[in-house]
Image: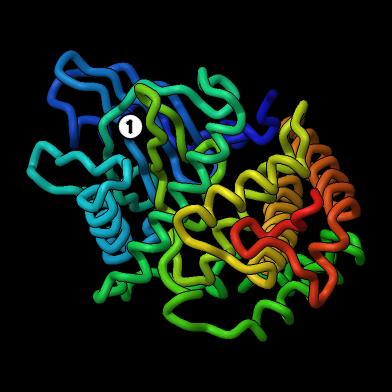
Amino acid sequence: MRDRTDLARALPDPLSAQERAAAARLFLADDCTLAPLSTWENLVYKATGRAATLVLRLSAATRRTRSQLEAELDWIDMLASHGVHAIAPARSRGGHRIETIALGGASYHVCAFPFIAGCRFGHAPLELDRRLADIGHCLARMHTLSEQCAAQPRNRPAWSDDYFVVHAGEMQSRVPGAVRNLYDDCLAAIAALPRSLRSYGVIHNDFHARNFFWAEGTLCAFDFDDMAHSWYMNDLGITLNWLMSLEGCDHRAARRRLLAAYGEIRPIDPAEARQADLFADFRWCLDYFHTAHAIARYPGLAPLASRMNVLMGARAQALACRASLQAVLAPGSCGSARDGTDKKN
């Protein structure tokens, strides 16, 4: 089984080697070796020094404010203190969790996290059923803690503040009419969803295979950069959307197992399972917008064209999966309250 969504290094790095080294010296005293991990939204590097190995993340100040990052790191610390295996931030040489530096005419907020060797989804030495169960359990635990948290972070965006939601109108000419129509339908349906402490809170908002791995048999979550206020089913939808991009996978069975595992800790009913599918469609549209935007900005970049092919393949898998689950998706269906699927399946 192979995850086909790894385009983290598809875009060019805007920083020079000297600028990257200057950022690393904020956290590591000695010279270190820097290996790029991502240039997609943030600039992320593996920094290997004599005393420690860290993951450096540089966020453009125009994309994230310092207060937003403080709220993210506070949330990670809260999750880690309550049993979720979330990778907590490291301190800089000055004792801070965040440092700000001017590089190449732009300002960046720099965070660092301990580098932990682990296995990605496609390489974890665990049965697929166990991997899907771990993912579902982790999401459910995070959502339960979010629901129970009395002090919700204020300095984090809402789902509707996503760049590609805010600027969707500007991108209409770059996407086919069918994608625009699907997006408009999803947006209208989401806006009509009820909100309650049970259904709406702080979510990871980007929980897919590049943002978790297994270390010593335990799933570790990281990269909470996109965390936002939204419906909990949005997190499940994002993960379901990613599942549809996997090769060599029984997508129907994977969907069923993920929802069942989530329901073992945090029961969901069929209506919520349909909400997860709604958010999977919504995430697919945002991914399409993001890719179309990048293609327009970097024409001819081969990985981006490949990404569009992956998106179309994932959409076909999602539709095929749902065609075999009509009893679940039809209004008034009577699926299992635990996993959101028809008991005959």
Tag 1's secondary structure?
strand
Percent x, y of residue 205? 51, 58
Quadrant of residue 128 within the rendered picture: top right
Residue found at x 43% / y 35%: 15
The front one of 297 and 278 is 278
What's the colour scheme? rainbow
**Alpha-carbon neighbours of circle 1 within 10 Å: few (<14), some, or many (≥20)?**
many
Percent x, y of residue 186? 75, 72
Q: Is residue 12 visible?
A: no
| Total numbered circles | 1
Can you say whether 137 is above or below 289 in the image?
above
Quadrant where the N terminus sits is top right
The front one of 233 and 206 is 233
Quadrant of residue 116 within the rendered picture: top left
Quadrant of residue 55 within the rendered picture: top left
In the picture of the structure, the residue carrying the numbered disc 1 is: 55
Residue found at x 69% / y 47%: 255
Q: Is residue 66 visible?
A: yes
Percent x, y of residue 100? 24, 51
Residue found at x 61% / y 46%: 258
Left or right, 221 with reference to 343: left
